[in-house]
Image (cartoon, rainbow, N blue to C red):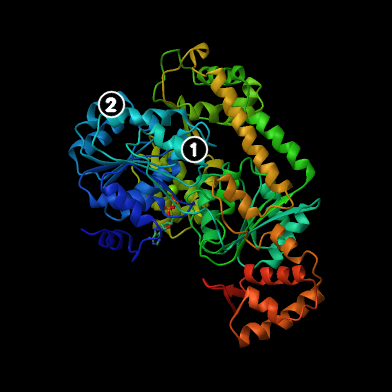
Amino acid sequence: MNLQAILLKYWGFSSFRPLQEDIIRSVIEGNDTLALLPTGGGKSLCYQVPGMAKDGLCIVVTPLIALMKDQVQALKLKGINAVGIYHGMSKVEIDNAIDNCVYGNVRFLYLSPERLVTDMMRSRLTKMNVSLLAVDEAHCISQWGYDFRPPYLRIAEIRELIPNTPVMALTATATTQVVEDIQEKLDFKDANVFQKSFERKNLAYMVFREEDKLNKLLKICRKQNGTGVVYVRNRRRTREIAEWLKQQKVGADFYHAGLSALERDAKQDAWMKERTRVIVSTNAFGMGIDKPNVRFVVHMDLPDSPEAYFQEAGRGGRDGNKAFAILLFNETDTDSLKQFLERSYPSIKDIKKVYNCLGNSFQLAIGSGKDQSFSFDVFDFARKYNFDPFLVFAAIGFLEKEGYLGSSDALANPSRLMIMVSNEELYRFQVANPRYNPFIKMLLRSFTGLFTEFTKIREDDIARRTGMSRNAVRKTFQELHKMNILHYKEQNEKPVITFLEERLAASDLRISKEVYRERKVFARKRMEAMIDYVSSETKCRSLFLLAYFGEKGKKRCGQCDVCLERNQAGVSAYEFNRVVKAIKPLILSEKHTLETLMNAMDLMLPEEKILNVIRYLIDNGKISENDDGVLSWK
Ligand code: ADP
Ligand code: MG
């Protein structure tokens, strides 16, 4: 089947985006391939289309469970047989999933790098017909990268087991150094990179030094039409800022990873459908979200790396229309970023201590616990063992990247229900409270055994059956629970921690001091680059970011705060208009290059100023210049 036909049949798209087709062809021809496309550039299709074009199984390695689930589900909806292996699945479930990849007609298997290299996988990998090994978020393989995950280093091991299968690596951000590193660590047969420029011509980067960030934010929200995202580091502040904006009549809401999955979905949905105009969020917002018409992305705090900033800011203007990426900054930010970095790298001793206390709190003996999951509340844990919650977050994040632990949102752990009164008492209650009568009747009709055991229920089903909203169903259960009529155990929304290996004695945790120190050094370098970005007053913001990612020879953007400032340099508005009045008729009436134009003009101002104005007009699209240098007015 040809590629276009596959694209249309399963995804309903009529054409590929730039580079997608080249990347797909490269890997179909059997070449190891590295695809560097910005976030939202359409990387998933780069392995999904070849996965469908070739017989057999496409294995997708990715670190992000939430995205894994989304993708598996999206493929299933298209009628494509896809499975994922997540933390929290039982051994039998994992075993079945892998079996299906050997004997069933599974086309896509999503898993984390830790799962890829288990004995269970290895022993059956050779029996699978693997057409492609796709490594998403491939920058995680490089310790120069901003999200190094050591288990990624082991991916190459399994290439020996499937020697004829090409590997495709995908990432949105990688410096030149990381690009080299990815290919080396994945044992590329030949160097082979497809890279879309990181230049975002419709995105205007702005940095404002502001003491009163809130008021500046308000001005931005009022001035910009359309949808926006505001990033803040602190969860509590997301709510405070959103509430303040609402008081000022800006349609805003907040979002962070501490909210329940339900709340997050609802908030995200409202924003996608433009019932919420501005979402104030931690960096938890945005992964996997694809909204084309975001007009502004504001950062209230300094991100910790240009990589992170580029990804987050890059959510603006996907539709190609003008959008703003605005960073509000003041002198205190530099210090808090430095502190943040220190706190994000707790001492190895503290990491081991947290690991040990986790094992104790889940009552795991040394040598046990592999693949067991536990629900977990950071704040309870921190209180109980006297840790700073932030340190616990950081330590778990570290242990997760090292492959000792997995953490995820709540497992699918449904709500349960049991009636706590006798049949007669319930009847009396119904008579005395007729308002609950229909609801209780429906329950008794729908479920058996409610009087004798906890029964799994799904609020969504009940909502459908009763015509109530899901929330009203929950409220009703909560009321009945309070009145001791029934016991309602609501779905467990606490995050889950999974031990991916047996609990080790803390002293046996393999954390190399040198590697750890080096990582911190790289993190500091990225932070310093970010501080340079905001501190510089002379370098075009776009050029700065491009240079950071190793792209040279681009033109300045003409629309960031630095360029705008420079464009105006030395020219008053009056002078500016005088020049425009003089050159516009010349350009409109005759063919001019810059040179002939300058000759034709009477020089009412110093030549340099006139050139400044013309450069500004070119940069801002008022004047365009064709390949022969001929100018035209738009
Ligand atoms: P990335 O992983 O690069 O951030 P995704 O693979 O998530 O990006 O794709 C982003 C969005 O672009 C998705 O909604 C996807 O359906 C859409 N998309 C990808 N390729 C095309 C295409 N050729 N035509 C139209 N939409 C596309
Ligand atoms: Mg992606």
Residue shown at the point (39%, 52%) measured from the top left: 461
**Amino acid identity at mark 2:** Met
How far across and how far down the image is residue 569, in percent? 78, 64
Circle number at residue 118? none
**Amino acid identity at mark 1:** Val
Secondary structure found at label 1:
helix
- Which circle, 1 or 2, is nearer the viewer? 1
How far across and how far down the image is residue 237, in percent? 69, 46
Residue projecting furthest to the bottom: 589
Residue shown at the point (50%, 47%) measured from the top left: 429
Residue shown at the point (57%, 50%) measured from the top left: 546
Badge 2: how crowded within 10 Å, few (<14), some, or many (20+)?
some
Q: Foreground residue, 5 or 179?
A: 179
Q: Are dots 1 and 2 in contact, CB under 8 Å?
A: no
Q: Which residue is mark 2?
A: 120
Badge 1: how crowded within 10 Å, few (<14), some, or many (20+)?
many
How far across and how far down the image is residue 450, in percent? 38, 40
Q: Foreground residue, 324 or 541?
A: 541
Question: Could you give the CA–CA distance between mark 1 and mark 2, rounded to whole angstroms?
Answer: 31 Å
Q: Quadrant of residue 19?
A: bottom left
Q: Which residue is mark 1?
A: 178
Residue shown at the point (56%, 23%) measured from the top left: 516
Q: Foreground residue, 436 or 507?
A: 507
Residue 318 seen from this side: yes
Q: Earlier in the sequence, mark 1 or mark 2?
A: 2
- Indicate the quadrant containing the C terminus: top left, top right, bottom left or bottom right: bottom right
